């Protein structure tokens, strides 16, 4: 079986669990929604700040809700000895990493679409240069999913997982937050040329973390 | 014999640290002149800059030790202990760098905090390694924990330049022509440069001394854990080997202790 097919198997398994348990739909998405409302309360919609800072708020909301989704992706491994089963399955560590990252990325993309509609509707944001916005979002999502999966397996199975995981992963994904927000701002302000350096930064981040995950995921899955 | 020399070495290192710190106090507070622009606030730089240097040195040592642990030919728990000890000192000095910089910023820049690229990336670095230390604190089998920590340390190390560049970029895109010039000009006035140099030397000795102490402490902690296990095993063995006490007048120790407590009250 090729690596790609193995990865698809793992991703399919994770997405099937999500589709059946509906935790992402019933809990993570509503959480993201309430975060959007809270931002509006904090910044007072009447002052006209919301459309200006919408890209940043969008990415903070993605990050916060994404943390839940990634935690969830590893919580399902802890139940019923799935982790051991995964180790015994003979799948390549790199393939398991790619599969889990793909599943996380798919969930993040759904989250981003819903939140994107949310900021357009609630914060009165106009999307210019949709292509740049789309490219930045896709690449940022890849980076987030890869870094999240690496740290997810690092913290998986620990008793303090819920509190440790955000502390580990948030400083690491700070550049994604920064890059994606600036890229969106540049695109929405109508100067897409300024967005490209940030998209490149996001791409570099993504490549680094996919490489790290590819190399380190197997040993981490075995040892912990 | 080796422990004698180790103790001797620690004492020498400690003495060097004390002497160099005294020299720093002398040069930094009394001998060096106040800066033309920053006045006396410049004296904080003799601590701030060396603290930042030690933080980077400490993280470098952590990364190197983690790499040596992961490399199979040099794998040893000693590298893991060293990585942890060095990271702790690194976090301490990163925090110190931020606090000292803030104290310096208030009189010179008129703000406690500025969203300057280097400050922000130092703050991210602080949290990055706090996370690493938190991960180390999670109880686990030593070998598992060592491998996990080593991988986490290397990932953090890879992240440092990414954070640095992204924040740097963010800053340059935003403020054209920075207001604050944090760069020390290449030509520092004579006795100011000496004070700064003495700070770097003193802090480097301090780092080495603290690292040695922390490393020793961690090794002792591990030894105690191992010893406690040995003692417990020996006790169980003794229990199994001991003849069953018959009713020949010997009082079981717990009963005797209970009687003593009863009399005392």
Image (cartoon, grey):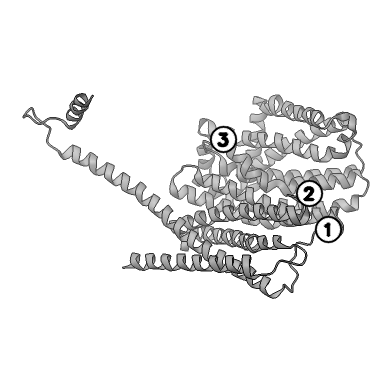
Could you confirm whether marks 3 and 2 are on the same chain?
A: yes
Mark linked to residue B179: 1
Subunit under mark 1: B
Q: Quadrant of the N terminus of chain B?
A: bottom left
Mark linked to residue A77: 3
Could you confirm whether marks 1 and 3 are on the same chain?
A: no
Residue A209 appears in the figure:
no
Residue B179 appears in the figure:
yes
The answer to whether residue B47 is above or below residue A82 is: below
Inter-mark Cα distance, 1 to 2: 24 Å
Q: Nearer the viewer, residue A206 or A14?
A: A206
Subunit under mark 2: A
Q: Which of B131 and B9 is in front in this view?
A: B9
- Asked which secondary structure carries label 2, the reply is helix
Q: Quadrant of residue A35?
A: top right
> Label 3: few (<14), some or many (≥20) within 10 Å?
some
Return the x and y of residue A39 as percentages of the image width and height.
79, 31
Return the x and y of residue A91 as percentages of the image width and height.
57, 44
Q: In which quarter of the image is the C terminus of chain B?
A: top left
Foreground mark, 3 or 2?
A: 2
Inter-mark Cα distance, 1 to 3: 51 Å
Q: In this view, does B198 lie to the left or right of B9?
A: right
Residue at 53% across, 61% down: B207
Circle nearer the N terminus (3, 2): 3
Inter-mark Cα distance, 3 to 2: 31 Å
Per the image, the residue denoted by label 2 is A179
Q: In this view, does B250 lie to the left or right of A91?
A: left
Could you confirm whether marks 1 and 2 are on the same chain?
A: no
């Amino acid at each position: 079986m090729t690596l790609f097919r193995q990865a698809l198997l793992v991703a399919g398994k994770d997405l099937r669990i999500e589709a059946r348990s509906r935790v992402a739909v019933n809990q993570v998405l509503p959480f993201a929604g309430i975060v959007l409302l809270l931002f509006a309360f904090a910044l007072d919609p009447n002052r006209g700040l919301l459309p200006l800072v919408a890209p940043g708020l969008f990415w903070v909301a993605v990050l916060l809700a994404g943390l839940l989704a990634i935690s969830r992706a590893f919580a399902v491994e802890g139940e019923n000895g799935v982790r051991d089963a995964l180790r015994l399955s003979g799948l390549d560590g790199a393939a398991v990493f790619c599969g889990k990252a793909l599943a996380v990325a798919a969930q993040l993309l759904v989250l981003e679409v819903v939140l994107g509609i949310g900021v357009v509707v609630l914060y009165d944001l106009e999307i210019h240069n949709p292509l740049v916005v789309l490219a930045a979002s896709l690449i940022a999502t890849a980076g987030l999913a890869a870094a999240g999966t690496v740290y997810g397996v690092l913290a998986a199975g620990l008793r303090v997982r819920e509190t440790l995981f955000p502390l580990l992963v948030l400083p690491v994904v700070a550049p994604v937050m920064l890059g994606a927000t600036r890229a969106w701002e540049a695109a929405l302000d109508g100067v897409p040329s300024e967005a490209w350096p940030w998209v490149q930064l996001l791409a570099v981040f993504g490549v680094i973390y996919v490489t790290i995950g590819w190399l380190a995921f197997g040993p981490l899955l075995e040892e912990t | 014999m080796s422990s004698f020399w180790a103790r001797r070495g620690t004492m020498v290192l400690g003495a060097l640290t004390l002497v160099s710190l005294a020299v720093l106090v002398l040069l930094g507070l009394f001998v060096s002149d106040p800066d033309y622009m920053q006045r006396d606030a410049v004296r904080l730089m003799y601590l701030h800059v060396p603290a930042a240097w030690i933080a980077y040195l400490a993280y470098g040592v952590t990364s190197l030790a983690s790499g040596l642990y992961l490399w199979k030919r040099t794998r040893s728990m000693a590298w893991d202990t060293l990585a942890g000890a060095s990271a702790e000192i690194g976090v301490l000095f990163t925090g110190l760098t931020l606090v000292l910089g803030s104290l310096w910023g208030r009189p010179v820049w008129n703000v406690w905090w500025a969203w300057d690229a280097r400050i922000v990336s130092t703050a991210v670095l602080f949290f990055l390694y706090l996370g690493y230390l938190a991960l180390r604190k999670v109880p686990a089998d030593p070998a598992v924990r060592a491998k996990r920590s080593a991988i986490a340390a290397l990932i953090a190390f890879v992240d440092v330049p990414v954070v640095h560049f992204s924040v740097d970029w963010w800053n340059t895109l935003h403020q054209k022509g920075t207001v604050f010039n944090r760069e020390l000009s290449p030509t520092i006035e004579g006795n100011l440069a000496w004070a700064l140099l003495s700070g770097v030397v003193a802090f480097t000795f301090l780092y080495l001394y603290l690292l040695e102490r922390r490393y020793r402490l961690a090794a002792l902690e591990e030894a105690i854990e191992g010893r406690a296990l040995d003692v417990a095993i020996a006790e169980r063995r003794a229990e199994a080997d001991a003849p069953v006490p018959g009713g020949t007048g010997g009082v079981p120790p717990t009963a005797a202790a209970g009687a003593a407590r009863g009399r005392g009250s």
